[in-house]
Amino acid sequence: MKPTCFHCGDQLGFRPILYKEKSFCCSGCKSVFQLLSSNDLVDFYKFERSPGTKPVQTTNDKYAFLDIPEIKKRYVKFEDEQLIKVVLKLPNIHCSSCIYLLENAHKIEKNIVTSQVHFTKKEASITFKKEHLPLSELALLLDNLGYPPNFQEQNSSAKSNHNFLLRIGIAGFAFGSIMLWSFPEYTGIGKQNLDIRAFTSWLSFAVSVPVLLISAREYYVSAYKALRSHHLNLDVPISLGIIALYSQSVYSIINQEGPGYMDSFSGFIFFLLIGKWFQNTTYQSLTFDRDYTSYFPVAVRVLVDKKEEILPIEKIEIGDIIRIRNQEIIPCDTVLLNTESIIDYSFVTGESSLIYKYKGEELYAGGKIMGNIAEMEVKRKSDRSHLTQLWNESLHNKNKTQKIRYQDKISALFLYTVLIISAIAAIVWATIDPQMILKVVVSVLIVACPCALALSTPFTYGNAMRKMGSLGCYLKNIDVVESMDGITAIVFDKTGTLTDPQQMEIIPSGEEVSIEAQSILFEMTGSSTHPLSAALHRFLANENLDFIAFKSFKEHVGKGIEVSTGNDDYQLGNAAFTQQGNHNNNELFFTKNGITIQKYVFKSQFRSDIKSLLSRLHKTKNFVLSGDTDTDLPSLLEIGFKKENIYFLQSPTLKHTFIQNLQSKGEKVMMLGDGLNDASALAKADIGIAISEDMFKFTPSSEAILDAKKLNKLDDFIAISKFSRLVLKICLGFSILYNLTGIIIAVSGMLSPLIAAILMPLSSITIVLLSTSLIFIRFRSLKN
Amino acid sequence: MLVVSLLIALLFLGLFLWASKSGQFDDDYTPSVRILFDDEVKNIDHKHGSTKV
């Protein structure tokens, strides 16, 4: 195994930094180690191996916007004269060492009073002395430690969760208590002591009222809404059953005939809510519904009376002059005022090349400035920009096509069957014993309450969703499991999805390069942050290189680097910069005194196992959409895509229309993409899956987030979804069997509270066990 | 007897609701890690370690 950095665990270059007998990959990692060891925090390295995150160099005023009161107050939870408490999202939190470091941050900065990490949400609440430590400096400290806070995303509140636990708590309490008091009824001794019986009946009634009013409320609301919009969902028969159950019980309590079905009633609600809770527990730290605001900066530098001021992005008006610096994102559609600027639009268009813009040209929001500060005039506000419009339009389209769940389809059938059976039973009983009609009809409605049916979907799909989550595919909710099964076409984005952005194939051409020149090139590329430089730096690393000092070093961001050793001048850069032939984005030239020594061609490398994945995905039509030119066509054909299914030069709008066309041909489309350029297509597709190298960084809004390393397991996820559909059918079969047994008993007029009390939990537990065991046994061999 | 059982059940319901309100079920991972840190405490003020909600 190659030696790795003590702090961040990255592979060491051939010239690591040694400090206190430990090796580090860069000075950033070393300085974090220095900071921690000087503050008695070396335990950070004990909990996990190389737990650190490589700190990225930042400017000191990166977080200056946080000292504007109206921005600051968004993150403040509590404030008094001395102390202030903020909650910050720190996406880099990933292990127990992180918790240790962040909760001991007061050892590093004495003005921090307490800090507490919420691991699952990746948040830290930090209390500090506001007089001595501005929020901007706190953010900078966290950034330097390797935990840059994310200010774009607002913190979600957990209030609804408390409310839900309250409803489960009440139902569970009532269920347990009433069952206990009904025990004499079950054994038959209840009738011997009528006083106690009346007392327990009324007690049960008292306890059941909050269940009816608080715990079960959402079922009537949902049923009412469904009926009003003229369709049926499963909540309609459930509500009908609940009402029948409850009124029958109240009737029997008033007539002093025992507590009726109060135990079954509260049990129903309790089990139903547990099912809901099971399906609702999702991935707290992942965000599926990001909108454009989480991509844009919170504040922008604006020129007011020739002075730079920081303003919240909402306050930017048309005509304002804004300043965007290196690596910052353009937040609105603007016109460039500089003579020249270099912009990286890769996240918006999917094209990996840098774009040159000149004075007076329009700049669309979403591009990243590379190089010098750019001044521009605002043409359209952020929420009206080209990018935002595209985004909103696609999300709007999505809402129209609401999916109808499988369980809702059968619930209509179920309801009508139950109503017909009750009607027939009523007619038959009218000829035998008219007094029994009401009892029989109510009994049928009670016993037909589809509790087990309602539990089948959340438990089956909930288990499938958990299984997929453990394998690296995180679904937004259980509906995605169902729709994944019916997929007929899969559309892949190329750049960043099929290709691995961190792996580049480098093809050098030219004569033999001397060790001296190689050493110079190695030093040049080591000081640059450009992705091509970094790739070249790794490519060159070997033990024979010498250290060479430069007389001068100059980096022209986005173009190239020039150095001088005193004797010779060297340049590394694109064709235009080094004045060598035609410009091509994937080429770098290395020149000595103006003469090319080497030409390096960079080719994107496809992720491993894509070929075998495609051979396993033979049942679906597989497409590739790429924003780039057709240079990768041979490799794509080699992997196994059909020539007629590969499309190049696809803009975000074209990708969107492509999906739309497929859908109009009746295809169910799954789209896999990674950037903002795919956002609109992801939203349009029946299932949009965002591919992510790092789960907790920015991903466009989607139905699922897939770990990029697990892309080759895509067929497994589809198999899980197909199998869970089968499991669901088995569960539905079982629950209908239980309901049928109950209905036969009810029709014959023999239903008693005891039978209901046995039948209801039995059916529910069967479903839970069946769905869990089937899915986990079938896919036990699939491991992370 | 019945009243006692009701009272006990009510007590547990109350405890459950109090626990969920005070955020006990919010984060089920961090505390399990945090408890391991206290072993090495030499001179940290305990109040500032991890309590306060």
Image (tube, coloured by chain):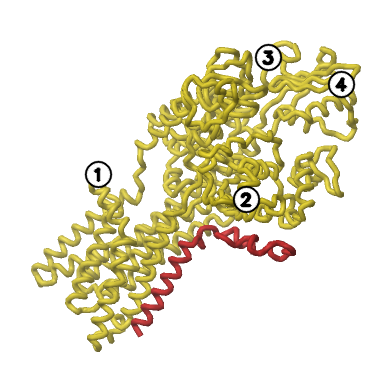
Dot in front, 2 or 4: 2
- Callout 1: few (<14), some (14-19), or many (20+) C-alpha neighbours within 10 Å? few
| Percent of width and height locating residue A646 | 54, 25
Please report whichever mark, 2 or 3, sits nearer to the chain's N-terminal start. Answer: 2
Q: Mark number for residue A193? A: none
Query: How far is the residue under mark 4 from the one under mark 3?
Result: 24 Å
Q: Which residue is mark 4?
A: A512
Marks 2 and 3 belong to one chain: yes
Identify whether A199 is placed above or below A323. below
- Residue at image x 61%, y 62%? B32
Q: Chain of mark 4?
A: A
Q: Decide which of A101, A539 is in the foreground and name it.
A: A101
Colour representing chain A: yellow
* CB within 8 Å, label 2 to label 1: no
Q: Which residue is mark 1?
A: A229
- Callout 3: few (<14), some (14-19), or many (20+) C-alpha neighbours within 10 Å? few
Q: Which residue is mark 2?
A: A129
Dot in front, 1 or 4: 1
Q: Chain of mark 2?
A: A
Q: Which residue type carries mark 4? A: Glu
Identify whether A48 is placed above or below A445. above
Query: How far is the residue under mark 2 from the one under mark 4?
Result: 61 Å
Q: Chain of mark 3?
A: A
Q: Which chain is red?
A: B
- Which quarter of the figure has residue A206? bottom left
